[in-house]
Amino acid sequence: MKIVIAGASTSGLFAAYLLAKAGHEVEVLERSAKLDPAVRTLIVTDKIHEVMGFIPHEIILNEVKHIDLFSKSKSSKMELDRPDLIIAREKLILMLARMSEESGVKISLNRRFQSFVSAKNGVAISYRNLETGEDKREMADYLIGADGVYSAVAKAASYNGHFHTSLLQARIKRPKDVRRDTYQVWFDVDRTKYFYWLIPESDDIAAVVDGFADAARRAVVAGCDGVEVNAGQFSLVRQFLSGLTNTRGDEWGEDRTLFARRVLAAVRDAVGADRVVGLRLSCDELAPWAGITPEMATELAPALVLDDSGAPIVDLLTVVRGSIFSAGATRPDGHTAPGFNLELTRTIRDAVRAVAGDRVAVAAQGSIVDVGMAEHAVVDGMADAVEMTRAQLADADLVAKVRAGQPERIRPCVLCNQTCQVRDNRNPIVTCVVDPTTGHETEDAPVPVEGAGVDGDGPAVTVLGGGVAGLEAARVAALDGHRVTLHERGDRTGGSARIAAALPGRDRFERFVDWLEDECSRLGVDIRLGSAPDAAELASAHQAGDRVVVATGGRDGERDYDVADGSVPVLSAGDVLGAVASVSSGPVPSGSVLVWDPIGGPIGVGVAELLAAAGHQVHIATPDQIIGNELARAGDLGPANARLAQAGVELHRRSILRVVDGDGALLEDRFSADVRRLEVASVLDAGHRLPDDELWIRVAALFGAGAVAAGDCVAPRTVHEAVLEGRRAVLGG
């Protein structure tokens, strides 16, 4: 259904979000030119909290636990079972607007609702475009009035059930007798119908500054050499620095650097002169309409690194980019160019050096995962130091290998964000796709040190399958000193990981496969391509007491839709992956293409992007409420949908593929059961896969405990599980 909401109020935007999430087409008409509500607070009671669900900490000004009630003759006190939340209304509006737009809501500003007329097929809505003065009319199934107490919708509907009241709100300095966690409500003042209350908006800022200092002091006591104050993407300090979020009318808003300077001074006093104080500073919020820009940061950074006397208060400044409005910069993956912050870092470094000389070091950050890029940044004067967090999750021995003159042996980070940057309230282990030892150090057997193993005297190891599970098993077995033979029935190693590397943003997976292959070759693994041992060879290996690791990967799953006559070709998941590297000349026919993606992972989205880039008219369909649903945990959900929209891919959400016949594809709405037909020349099935376990069943029967399966032949999942199981197949666990 199409639903029009008049008024971009909190209720209007929240209703729009819920309706869009439920699958409806929603448009919000707002008469104002921008989403800029009056600066006032909003009280979120227990019931409202229950309806809204999770409320981000950054929009909460205070929590109130008590109420003091007063009249002329009486007073009483109440304690709330659950604290009321004092919310920054303007921040809530912006948050709801972002959530709504990400869910598909269209927000139209400068649109003043005028009237409506009920019709058989819905509601005819009239409004004026205040930018052009043009009167417009459109049809909708439903109209919702969320345009305030003087609602034009209610007036047009001749609804007189609402009442008008007067509201006056002002910000005052909190009286000393009003506690930070307590309302004061006054009734029957001068026997009028009005009442007033005092709402403590925020906690005492001085207490927050003290909290920073106390945390720094505890860190030093615990043995840390220093601390870093976070003024990066999601931090409170950045919010005070930015015009995007700091709209205060007091001293903390008049000088937006005041809070940061107070915090840095308190932290320096807490840790002492002999400890390191770092500052992580967002120097570009990517919100130039109100946020910190690079130009502003060239003045901001020098002002923060020195104290009032001109002495350095900060030892290390790390330049970052982004805010809550820019997830791509906050959690960059393979779609973002490595080293994207380097030029910005050079600019900030030059500005800091102009006032502090070399007394303050400036560090670069931002998808720097290659040693060569890091060295170039320092040598070229872009930065004094480089952060390489994900690179060292991928290879904890990165520094040692550089010092040993073996940078080519560093295990490459693939910039996938799949397991290292997951923001999940279930608190999963932070680990790494290419090195699952990370995060599992206490539960897995340690990887053998090269040359310290059985030195060829133990049982030989035969690995069947040359995907990442098989390669990792072969590498670890060789490190342990075993004689290893790897059989791969194809003409190259890497399996689906190498093929998937042709997808946008995933090219670095090929580097990882190359690294595995190079390490296996260096360690003496006998890699046999186009090889599949027969029953006699397996029997001989069993007779010799060899150990076997089966990593034969997966196969295409069964189709749960009908294919009529074959006039519209349906390519399976295996065909899709095989065609990725050459979509413009591969088996995909010319014309319109439907990508059927019941999984919501990177394959369907990536193939749709590639086909669109090759000139195809592309449709992508999923039963989920949003395209690429599984990309959310890695931070690519919003960016992926933006890329699809920019590429002109037509999105079909909440859809189930039922039939493919000579006329194209038949999609059914999973909620309404409405059916619609797409005229397409081909269908690409990016659906579920099944284990290719035929060989495993035979091997397990022959070898018993001497054989183990790993990777997709157990169950098709991600590269992380494949690598982890390949390792555990050799080490146990």
Image: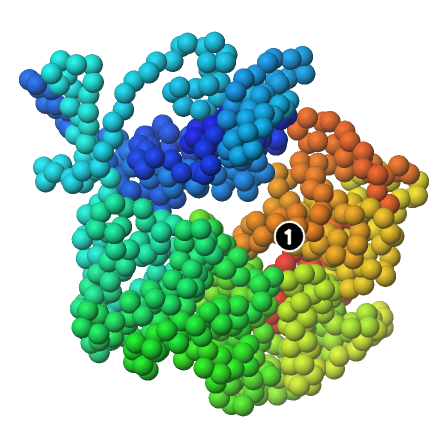
Q: Position of residue 585 (x, y in %)?
A: 86, 61
In-front residue for pair 580/82 = 580
Colour option used: rainbow
Q: Amino acid at mark 1?
A: Arg
Q: Where 30 falls versus 712 (above or below)? A: above
| Residue reaching furthest to the left | 73
Horizontal side, residue 106 vs residue 152: left or right: right
Q: Is residue 718 visible?
A: yes
**Residue 410, image quadrant:** bottom right
Q: Position of residue 3 (x, y in %)?
A: 58, 25
Q: Position of residue 203 (x, y in %)?
A: 22, 45
Horizontal side, residue 239 vs residue 335: left or right: left
At 24% from the left and 39% from the top, the residue drawn is 201
In-front residue for pair 14/451 = 14
In the picture of the structure, the residue carrying the numbered disc 1 is: 643
Q: Is residue 555 visible?
A: no
- Marks counted in the figure total 1
Q: Position of residue 563 (x, y in %)?
A: 87, 40
**Residue 293, image quadrant:** bottom left
Q: Where 358 falls versus 319 (above or below)? A: below
At 81% from the left and 63% from the top, the residue drawn is 582
Q: Where 69 falls versus 269 (above or below)? A: above
Horizontal side, residue 253 vs residue 461: left or right: left
Would you call the spot at circle 1 few (<14 residues within 10 Å), some (14-19), or many (20 or more)?
A: some
